[in-house]
Amino acid sequence: MNAYAYTRVSTTRQADEGLSLPEQADRIKAHCHRKGWKLARTFVERGASATRLARRPQLERAIEAACASSGVLVFFDLTRLARNLGDAVAIERRLRDAGAHFAAVNEPWETATPTGRLLFHFLAAIAEWDSGIKGEKIAASNRRTVEELGHRTNGPQPAGYRLKSGKRVACPRELEVIEMARNLAQIEGFAGAAKMLCEQGIPTIASLRGYKRKSC
């Protein structure tokens, strides 16, 4: 049977959520060897949250590959696949309808059997509950931080500021660009200011921060 590995890490939670991409891949490879499955391909998702199924193109490709060959989709544990019960069940059903199934290296079940599917449903529900609890704790922590400091100390910061050692500090270059844009906008309007800044080769805040525009 062909096996298709799926590995994923979240850039914000990688340290807390478990193994790195190479470690996940090694564990999956060893598991496939023990099971006698042929590891046909590995699909890697970098910096993708398990709560956003639509934003994980590599997972979609892995599912399609497993369905096409009636194979098995293999991942390290259920949190790598989904933290939402509805998403996890939808993936399992889609694979089953195509004569495929999935398996978790770190959990004693496969959806190829009725008992395995029962265990999967229990664990998927627990994963969703755990994600919700963690989300509530993070939200509460952020609220306390905002109440104490007046701003968040994690995640993207407003234009003109950045985080340094957990504290918000001014970013002179960004503030300079903002001031230029504000002054030009008073004379040329927003569209005119944007055009002039572009013609002068003035970088945008996004480019200063190293963000890459996604292709359409």
Image (spheres, rainbow, N blue to C red):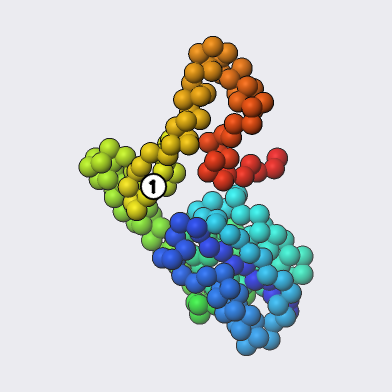
As drawn, 128 above or below 196: below
Q: Nearer the viewer, residue 155 or 72?
A: 155
Q: Residue furthest left?
A: 148
Q: Secondary structure at mark 1?
A: strand
| Res 95 quadrant in image | bottom right
Left or right of 20? Residue 6 is: right
Please provide percent x and percent y for residue 47: 55, 57
Report the residue marked by disc 1: 163
Q: Nearer the viewer, residue 158 or 172?
A: 172
Q: Nearer the viewer, residue 138 or 167?
A: 167
**Circle 1 crowding by C-alpha within 10 Å: few under 14, some 14–19, many from 20:** some
Left or right of 171? Residue 55 is: right
- The residue depicted at 50 percent of the width and 77 percent of the height is 106
As drawn, 154 above or below 93: above
- The residue depicted at 57 percent of the width and 44 percent of the height is 211
Left or right of 110? Residue 94 is: right
As drawn, 55 above or below 104: above
As drawn, 44 above or below 38: above
Q: At label 1, which amino acid type do we have? A: Leu
Please provide percent x and percent y for residue 92: 60, 64
Q: Residue furthest top?
A: 187
| Res 161 quadrant in image | top left
- The residue depicted at 37 percent of the width and 53 percent of the height is 135
- The residue depicted at 77 percent of the width and 65 percent of the height is 68
- Asked if residue 110 can be seen in this view, the reply is no
Please provide percent x and percent y for residue 102: 62, 71
Q: Nearer the viewer, residue 8 or 202?
A: 202
Left or right of 66? Residue 202 is: left
- Asked if residue 5 can be seen in this view, the reply is yes
Location of the N terminus (image quadrant): bottom right
Q: Residue furthest right?
A: 69
